[in-house]
Amino acid sequence: MLRDKVKKMLTSSKLGDFDLIIEPNKTTADFVLELLKFRELFFFMAWRDILVRYKQTVIGVAWSVIRPLLSMVIFTVIFGRVAKLPSEGTAPYPIMVFSALLPWQYFANSMQQSAESLIRAEHMVSKIYFPRIIMPTSAVLVSAVDFLISLVLLCLLMLVYRFVPSPYIVLLPVFFLPATLAALGVGYWFSAIGVKYRDFRHIMPFLVQFGLYVSPVGFSSSVIPDRWRLLYSINPMVGVIDGFRWCIQGTAVSLYLPGFIISIVTSSIVFYFGLRYFRKTERSFADFI
């Protein structure tokens, strides 16, 4: 009799009454706990991306050295020799440029890798449930490995030029944090947009190139007129790059403190709204992929 009642209930009910919807947790506390629960998957994905990037390649880890080195040479020739822009502080022009390339390439690589992270893992996103935010976050962690390799190259470059860095170099992690916040925020935003609009990845090289030109990589931000420096510092990488140069050269260069504060605020805002947009659109990723 019970079986007949269940059968009657199933045949008389609509299919929509039994739809199962899996969606991310709403509260921040549940969201953090879920990330802690999947922490092993996070580190596994990051380690997998590191192995894929450097295993069975022609030049392997050397690519992380050659790319910033070539960029430094190009910027030194164009801005230092041709445009004859002044060098800031006592450091040679190549060191000034390379100390700016470190945070910029970390940010640019994180942004590019995060934007394509969900598309590369579409077979996982469409079949199993896990916090999707793991994918763009692990991409930023992989870019941090490239950053450490380039940091070793900077130390070797200072040995070549016999340049003694400032004791403030121990404060580099302070300026690394806003760069990470900005990279995560933009990465979350672009990865979510890239799932829905596949042609967005073709815009990424243009955005990276544009960001490179408006950031003080090949020149010092001190060349910007004082009345525009505060507005110029809305770019979160301006305060980060100035901070890196200050850590390496110390009192030989001036740290524009109002600009650095604005960069921290901008990075935090970008991170907050990027994370919010990602969580808002996360439930529809499997449908679009």
Image (spheres, rainbow, N blue to C red):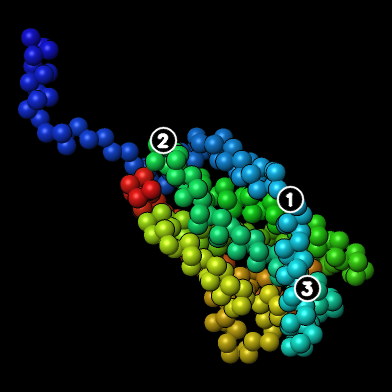
Residue 82 or 280: which is nearer the viewer? Answer: 82
Tag 2 secondary structure: loop
Tag 1 secondary structure: loop
Q: Earlier in the sequence, mark 1 or mark 3?
A: 1
Q: Earlier in the sequence, mark 3 or mark 2?
A: 3
Label 2, residues with CA under 10 Å away: few <14, some 14-19, many ≥20: few
Residue 235, relative to residue 58: is it above or below?
below
Where residue 219 appears, x then y in whole percent? Answer: 71, 80
Mark seen at residue 73 = 3
**Which of the two discs, 1 and 3, sits closer to the camera?**
1
Q: Are marks 3 and 2 in contact (CB under 8 Å)?
A: no
What type is the residue that disc 2 sits on? Ile
Mark seen at residue 128 = 2
Where residue 82 appears, x then y in whole percent? Answer: 76, 87
Name the image quarter holding residue 128. Answer: top left
Q: Are marks 2 and 1 in contact (CB under 8 Å)?
A: no
CA gap, disc 1 and disc 3: 23 Å
Instruction: Identify which residue is drawn at 61% across, 40% down.
Output: 48
Where residue 3 appears, x then y in whole percent? Answer: 12, 12
Where residue 288 appears, x then y in whole percent? Answer: 35, 50
Residue 85, relative to residue 21: is it above or below?
below
In the picture of the structure, the residue carrying the numbered disc 1 is: 58
Is residue 252 in view from this perspective? no
Instruction: Identify which residue is drawn at 66% across, 77% down.
Output: 216
Residue 146 or 265: which is nearer the viewer? Answer: 146
Q: Is residue 78 left or right of residue 25?
A: right
Q: Earlier in the sequence, mark 2 or mark 1?
A: 1
Label 3, residues with CA under 10 Å away: few <14, some 14-19, many ≥20: some
What type is the residue that disc 1 sits on? Val
